[in-house]
Every structure is written in structure tokens, then in C-alpha cells.
Amino acid sequence: MRGNTYRNRLVRLVVSVSFVASACGSTASNSDRVDARSVDVATNRDSLPAALLGTAPPPAGQSVRYFAPDSQTTGYLALPTDDGPHPAVILIHEWDGLNDRVRQVADALAREGYVALAADLYRSRSGSNRDENMALVREARDDMTTVIANLDGAQRFLRARDDVTGGIATIGWCFGGGIALSYALGGAHHEGTAIFYGQLLADPAELARIDHEIYGTFAEMDSGIPPAEVERFVAALRESGVPNDVHVYDAVDHGFWLWVDRDPDRQLAPAVDAWRRLQAYLSRTLLVSLWIR
């Protein structure tokens, strides 16, 4: 079983090596504007994880305590079916806390061959309305030392496992997307950061501290993080020499990727494209790190 896993990874790795060679040797950005109405991809529902469509079965993983200083912090762990070892991903929830949609995405990533740990930055709490969500966001952002320590704990938990290769990326949405970027700047070394419509910054000196490629997916109609802000972010990444794959999708709004079922006619096509980009990104960042090791 393990031998087949490595062979499959090497096939995927060969497909992505040519891209890596050019991306790592260049400061050019891939910050494209993508029209959601004309994305040339298969838009059938089978192209996306069921989690994004609201049709996934109940979460099948397990609750785990990964942050020793706080016994109330409870993450969610989803594992591939074979022995591995596997690369790993840390999922960072939206503003309302760790919910079943994020757990189901963790299950989907486990089926892709990643050990997936959904972090809990709210100490097992969640919000049910805007005021509650914002209170939890403010509490977390006011104590970023603990947030970074929490995610460092998630990394230690994963790196200590025999079924993890050591290659780890973070994936965050909304509040979690901004936290993923903050963690890339201030956390322990890791191999990848995927930001879905998260809070950004545009300081080249700060961004120069990032030592890996950045993935970003954003929405044209997002008034909180408008395209102009994304462009400034990409320009700063470019000036800093940080490779990136950042796209703004036209005609969709904030949250379109994690909640495709809210407007599938509009959101399905760009969500498929963003999913395929994410699959390729994780392959070239985490599988190349496995190959180099």
C-alpha cells in the first residue's frame, strides 16, 4: 500500500516540477482576474468535494487535543486510508469557529492524500450571529501570541506523527485566511500558505520574511477585500520576491468557495478552478518538499 502511495505521488510530482523550476527562479506573479462566467473548466458537481456543495456525509474524523497549554482547544483530525507517510495541512476556520463544513473539507483533503488537522482558535466555542462572531475574532486578534502558539502546537502535533512526511501547509478562509498570512510571517517554518479571501497587507519588507509560495483566491465583489487591495498585496509579494499564485474571480463575492451551495449557478465554475489550483499548489509545495528530503 505504501509503495503505491509513493508511486502515485511521484507521478503527480513530475507533472508539477516544470512549474516549480520557473516559479522559484522568478519574482513574477500569477495574479490573474478570472471571469466566473467564462472559466474553461468542467463545471459538473463531481469536480468539487461534496463538502463545498453541502452534500457531504457527517464528519468521519476524530477530535484531538493538540495544544497542550489549553485543554479546551479541540481540533479535528482526518486521515487518509493508507499508511503513508503523507504531507499534512492545517485548516484555519472562518470567523464563526470550527464547524462541520470545515471538518468535511478536512475529510476531503484526507481523501486527496493529506493528513488534515482543522485547528481550533476559539477554545471549542463558536458564534451564531455577527456580534458573537466579531467578539470571537477580536479576542483572537487581540492575543496573536496565543494564536501563533496554537498553530505552532498544531505543527508539532503533526510533525510528531509517523504518518506525516514533515511537509505542512496552512489553508484558511476569511478570518482564517488572514490568520494564515499572519502565521506565514510569524510562526514556525512551514512549506505552504493558502489564503481564501483573508485580510492582507502590502508591506514588501514584512512580506519578504515569507520563505514559500503563497496561494490566494479572492472575489471581485468582495467589498471587504476589494480587487485593488489584492493587487497591492500581489505587487508587494512581487517586490519581495515571494512566488505566488493569486487570482481574483469575477462576478462572485466573499465566501464563494467554501459555500458553493449558496449560489451554485454563479459559484460552481470559479470554485472548480480554485479547487484545481489548490490541488496543484499543494502538490508542488508539499510533494516537492518530500522529494527534496
Image (spheres, rainbow, N blue to C red):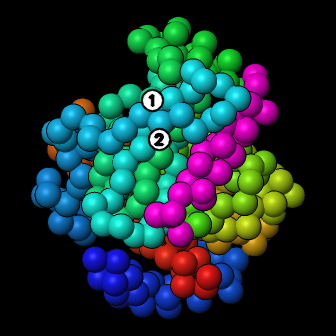
Q: Is residue 60 left or right of residue 147?
A: left
- The quadrant of the picture occupied by the C terminus is bottom right
Say which of 128 and 163 sits in front.
163
**Res. 259 mark:** none
Q: Residues within 10 Å of mark 1 (few under 14, many from 20)?
A: many
Residue 265 is one of the magenta-drawn residues: no
Q: Is residue 96 left or right of residue 48?
A: right
**Res. 118 mark:** 2
Can you tell which quarter of the image residue 292 is in?
bottom right
Q: Residues within 10 Å of mark 2 (few under 14, many from 20)?
A: many
Give the total number of marks visible in the rendering: 2
Residue 144 is one of the magenta-drawn residues: yes
CA separation in Å, label 2 and label 1: 7 Å
- The quadrant of the picture occupied by the N terminus is bottom left
Tell which circle, 2 or 1, labels the residue nearer the N-terminal end. Answer: 1
Q: Position of residue 219 (x, y in %)?
A: 44, 46
Q: Which residue is mark 1?
A: 98
Residue at 74 percent across and 49 percent down: it is 187
Residue at 24 percent across and 52 percent down: it is 49
Can you tell which quarter of the image residue 272 is in?
bottom left
Q: Position of residue 115 (x, y in %)?
A: 43, 57
Check the image and report above or below for 237 versus 250.
below
Check the image and report above or below for 221 versus 72.
below
Q: Which stretch appears magenta?
A: 142-165
Check the image and report above or below for 27 versus 86.
below
Residue type indicated by callout 2: Ala
Q: Secondary structure at mark 2?
A: strand
Say which of 234 and 211 sits in front.
211
Residue at 63 percent across and 35 percent down: it is 67
Return the residue found at the far front.
Answer: 162
Residue at 70 percent across and 53 percent down: it is 184
